[in-house]
Amino acid sequence: MDFTPSARATELTEAVRAFMQAEIEPVEEQYHRDLAAADDPWTPLPVVAELQAKAREQGLWNLFLPAGHGDAYAEKYGTTGGTGLSNVDYAPIAELTGRSFLAPHVFNCNAPDTGNMEVLLRYGSPEQQREWLEPLLRADIRSAFCMTEPDVASSDATNMAATAVVDGDEMVINGRKWWSTGVGHPDCAILIFMGLTAPDADRHSQHSMVLVPRDAPGVKVERLLSTMGTQDPPHGHGEVSFTDVRVPLANVLAGPGRAFEIAQGRLGPGRVHHCMRLIGLAEAALELACRRALDRTAFGKPLANLGGNRERIADARIKINQARLLVQHAAWLLDTQGPLGAFSAVSEIKVAVPTMAQEVIDMAMQLHGGGGLSEDLPLAGAWTNARALRLADGPDEVHRGVAARLELMKYGAKR
Ligand SMILES: Cc1cc2nc3c(=O)[nH]c(=O)nc-3n(C[C@H](O)[C@H](O)[C@H](O)COP(=O)(O)OP(=O)(O)OC[C@H]3O[C@@H](n4cnc5c(N)ncnc54)[C@H](O)[C@@H]3O)c2cc1C
């Protein structure tokens, strides 16, 4: 196993670090204050586009694009394309951006757009790529992924009941989705919709993924959901109804019935990226905890020297380092053996890392007393993010099920 990033990745990581220190960190606190005070928090603040323009100028743009793909776009767009990094190479960059809420957006490396761009890159036709991938790569538009449904247990994707029915040269779409992240953003222009096309086909060939323009007649954002008290503007998580929505058959990704194959490809790297960013978030929380532990005095001593706090800090360092190694291992397996070879490893990190981040952030909140739960500090938002990732992209239990199944199969168990 070799987790050493390439010379190019090391250079890019240092450039991202310098950009974050010079451009993002000085404005981030004010950004959150301005957004909270804005009359309409759903209109993005201009600072985001300004920072995006600077990042793009410096070639720090679309760094998530996978090896073998990014370079084609780098050539096409000059510095605005990707760099085609391996997962091991991208890991330290994603970790850095995960320290900040703004950074992934500034570098055009935020979920769910990255996963949706990867789908278009791997499975989109040249027309689909021209119409939707290229504006996404430029950040001219945003996207959402509409799989989860309120009426069925969506941790089992074979349950999806919303329909995508072939009618001549059109697809007709009906049903209701929720937790469609990003659908509240005013630039959200394209939805990847997963629906039932062939109920009688084999279990994993019944569903299709279809590109549905956000403004197609029959698409309605019914409401924006609140996650632990925040609606997460200007991105949002929406409940969306689809009523007799008609799109050309050419909007189906890869062909009818291929949704599961696509989902597999989309979620592997996406889950690793989430975990890489969470390592960064946990590091940022530990840094705040240490500073607080040294600066604040109670009962005549710094908090660091009071009952058990040193052990808590040490445990946080140990847990972060363990989790990072596990993520690097999953990234290396994805690079060297592909999604099938990394199947268990990706599920393992999807269980381990959000739980680790939640625990580290919780410890940091506790050391900050009442302030830790306020919006004066980024910790409550960070905790919510980690907590949500124990559900988003599959609940912990489902990923434990994958790891257990693969382990038991080594000893003769059937699927
Ligand atoms: C902040 C946030 C953002 C999200 N973004 C998106 C998005 O952009 N697009 C999208 O489509 N979805 C998104 N989701 C939805 C998320 O992927 C689903 O909530 C998740 O897959 C679980 O589906 P469900 O809510 O229907 O829960 P259910 O399927 O009803 O499951 C409920 C619970 O049952 C238990 N359970 C389920 N299966 C098993 C099992 N095999 N073994 C043991 N216990 C089990 C688990 O405890 C699970 O949490 C998001 C969710 C959140 C919170």
Image (tube, rainbow, N blue to C red):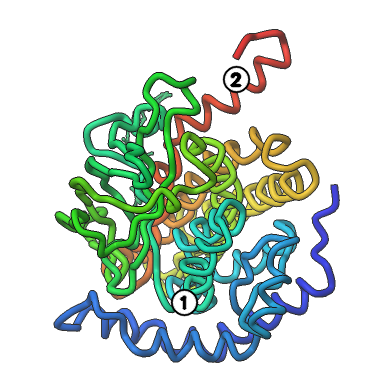
The residue type indicated by label 1 comes to: Ala
Can residue 366 be seen in this snapshot? no
SS class of the residue under badge 2?
A: helix
Q: Quadrant of residue 16?
A: bottom right
> Which of these two is toward me, 160 or 270?
160
SS class of the residue under badge 1?
A: loop
| Disc assigned to residue 405 | 2
Q: Mark 1 points at which residue?
A: 139
Rendered residue at 50%/26% (across/down)? 204
x and y, in percent, of residue 196 in the image: 35, 33
Relative to 152, 253 lies left or right: right
Relative to 354, 245 lies left or right: left
The residue type indicated by label 2 comes to: Arg
Relative to 53, 239 lies left or right: left
Q: Identify the mark nearer the N-term, 2 or 1.
A: 1
Question: In the displayed structure, would residue 266 be above or below residue 40?
Answer: above
> Which of these two is toward me, 75 or 127?
127
Rendered residue at 27%/30% (across/down)? 152
Question: In the displayed structure, would residue 85 be above or below residue 376?
Answer: above
Rendered residue at 53%/28% (across/down)? 400
Give me the C-alpha separation between circle 2 and circle 1.
40 Å
x and y, in percent, of residue 283 in the image: 56, 64
Count numbered badges in the picture.
Answer: 2
Q: Quadrant of residue 171?
A: top left
Nearer the camera: disc 2 or disc 1: 1
Question: In the displayed structure, would residue 53 be above or below residue 205?
Answer: below
x and y, in percent, of residue 397 in the image: 45, 29
x and y, in percent, of residue 156 in the image: 40, 29
Rendered residue at 73%/71% (across/down)? 71
> Which of these two is toward me, 355 or 258?
258
Crowd tier of the residue under label 2, counting other residues whose Cα lies within 10 Å: few below 14, some 14–19, many 20 or above: some
Does label 1 point to a residue whose CB lies under 8 Å from ligand 1? Answer: no
